[in-house]
Amino acid sequence: MGLYSAVSTEIGEKLFNDFVRYCRADGGYAALADVVTKQQRDEMESFALAETFKYFYLLFAPPDTLDFDKIVFNTEAHPLRRAW
């Protein structure tokens, strides 16, 4: 694992742990009204499950989970087969 991968994984772990710690709510994951106080809003953004957790999964999945020479992701985290 190169330095970039190690740093990315370390930052990703911190981000994931903080996401769970500060955003977890009884019915899912709340958006934050204030990132300083960590006050939660009474709503969950639709992309929390559809995109955010998909990227968390890919960050921690085994390297051979997807062939990134053949797959790219659009801005909504949908995988697309590369045609170039």
Image (cartoon, rainbow, N blue to C red):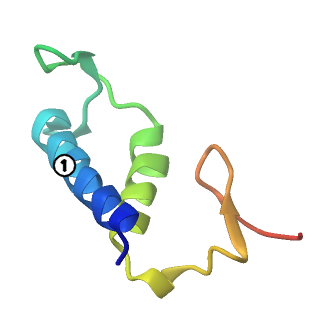
- For label 1, the crowd category at 10 Å Cα-Cα, with few meaning under 14, some 14 to 19 and many 20 or more, is few
Residue 44 location in percent, x, y?
34, 31
- Based on the displayed image, in which of its 4 quarters is residue 26 positioned? top left
Residue visible at 34% across and 78% down?
Answer: 1
- Based on the displayed image, in which of its 4 quarters is residue 20 positioned? top left
Residue 76 location in percent, x, y?
61, 45
Towards the viewer: 40 or 35: 35
**Could you tell me which quadrant the C terminus lies in?**
bottom right
Residue that badge 1 annotates: 14
Relative side of 67 to 5, left or right:
right
Q: Which three-letter amino acid code belongs to the residue tagged 1?
A: Lys
Extreme residue toward the right, this view:
84
Relative side of 58 to 17, left or right:
right
Residue 77 location in percent, x, y?
58, 52
Towards the viewer: 59 or 46: 59
Asked if 74 appears above or below 40 in the picture, the reply is: below
Residue visible at 49% across and 87% down?
Answer: 64
Towards the viewer: 78 or 70: 70
Q: Is residue 27 visible?
A: no
Asked if 68 appears above or below 54 in the picture, the reply is: below
Relative side of 59 to 81, left or right:
left
Residue visible at 38% across and 82% down?
Answer: 62
Residue visible at 10% across and 41% down?
Answer: 21
